[in-house]
Structure formats: C-alpha cells, structure tokens
Image: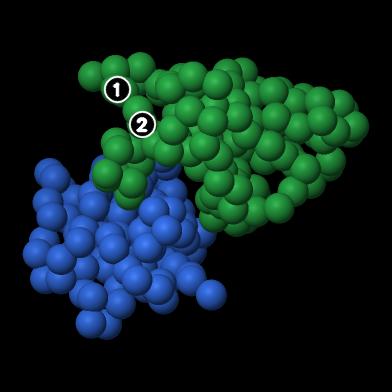
Chain colours: A blue, B green
Amino acid sequence: EDKVVQSPLSLVVHEGDTVTLNCSYEVTNFRSLLWYKQEKKAPTFLFMLTSSGIEKKSGRLSSILDKKELFSILNITATQTGDSAVYLCAVGGSQGNLIFGKGTKLSVKP
Amino acid sequence: SQTIHQWPATLVQPVGSPLSLECTVEGTSNPNLYWYRQAAGRGLQLLFYSVGIGQISSEVPQNLSASRPQDRQFILSSKKLLLSDSGFYLCAWSRTGVPYEQYFGPGTRLTVT
C-alpha cells in the first residue's frame, strides 16, 4: 500500500530558528513530490520536486528530494510567526493522484 | 489567473439529509478536478477526480457521488448523510497533462449532527 509519512507530527520553535521537516514515502511508480502549507483553510502550493538532489528555493523556504532513500526535507530559515501552519507532503503516483501525509504542525512563538 | 471557488464555506446538516457541494474554476479550460476530504487527525483523502465532462473516477467506495455537468464545475453529493461524513471537503484543480500540481479551493467545513 502506498504511504507517505511525515515527521515530526508537531514542532514548536521560536522566531529566528531554523526548522527541518521530513517526509518519507513508499509509492509505486513515483512521479513527483509536493509540499503544501495549510493555515486555516486551503493548502497552498509550495514546491513540486521530481529530480533528486536539485534544491528548490523560495525565499526562506527550500526543499530537496532524495529518490534513492525515498525522502524529502523542507527547510525554513529565520522562522517568523507567519510560518505557523500545517505543512503537508504529498506524492504523485502512476494513477495521477496525490497521496498525502498527515502533516507537520509548526508553531512559531514570538 | 486561475481562481477556484467552493460553497458553502460551512454547513451543518442532520444525519439522513442530502448534500450538495459545488466547486467552480475560472481562468482555465479542461482542468482536472478533484474532491478531497480531510478528517480530524487524518491526511487528505482523495474521493473523486475527473478529467473531463461526465468522466468521474471514484477512489473510495462510500455514500457520496460526484458529477461534472460543465467543464469547470464539479459537484459532490449525497442522498443521505452519515455522521462519518463530517469533515473538511476540498476541491482542487490541475492543468491537463500536469496532474500532480494541484491547487485547492477554500474548502467546506461539513458537520453532520
């Protein structure tokens, strides 16, 4: 059965800290891995990764994929209270669907 | 730019009542459309997806159904709600040929009492 596992489930840090969120997967016919940020409502798209070793970066957020070890990390540097959210990892399989992890809840304290 | 709408934002319905949630997308043609449910403590679960008008694939057997009467309209329905249908329902879209980069609507919070 396909599965995506995120760790930790929750994390509390202070403003300015750097955090690393983890996502491991076991998916038949892997096609891509995506990261989303979910605040109160809809998840918003952050990154889509398809190739190993190529870092994607957007401001203070960056992500990288390791297709050999079947995991990805999402880094957030110099965290701000606005980074508080649930971060979702999802993996695309051969059916065109996304399999989601349960998310990591990040709380950034001032 | 593309926009996705869902309504209503919140809904409280008694057990056994019918359900109709609507999703529309603007600014794109022939999108792939998806319905997800997010229950407390669980990840997003894909319920239905559609690659075109009248084409619906179901991922999870249940008392829900979906329809796509127009290119950019996707409807989630039930004839009789169960308590277990409570959750946060999200509609998403992606471009044809790019199924994994999905963009989500604002969601509907459904509580079945």
| SS for dot 1 | loop
Residue in the picture at 55% in, 46% down: B57
Residue A26 x %, y % = 41, 76
3D distance between C-alphas at marks 2 and 1: 7 Å
Quarter of the rendering containing residue A82: top left
Residue A36 x %, y % = 35, 47
Residue B109 badge: none
**Which residue is at the far bottom?**
A69
Quarter of the rendering containing residue B51: top left
Are circles 2 and 1 on residues that touch, CB within 8 Å?
yes
Residue in the picture at 75% in, 26% down: B19
Residue B42 x %, y % = 60, 56
Quarter of the rendering containing residue A45: top left
Q: Kindly identify the amino acid type of the residue bearing the numbered disc 1.
A: Thr
Q: How many marks?
A: 2
Quick check: A93 left or right of B15?
A: left
Residue in the picture at 82% in, 30% down: B79
Residue B11 x %, y % = 71, 23
Residue B31 badge: 2
Residue placed most toward the observer, A92 or A48: A92
Q: Residues within 10 Å of mark 2 (few under 14, many from 20)?
A: many
Q: Kindly identify the amino acid type of the residue bearing the numbered disc 2.
A: Pro
Q: Quadrant of the N terminus of chain B?
A: top left
Q: Chain of mark 2?
A: B
Residue B28 badge: 1
Residue in the picture at 54% in, 55% down: B43
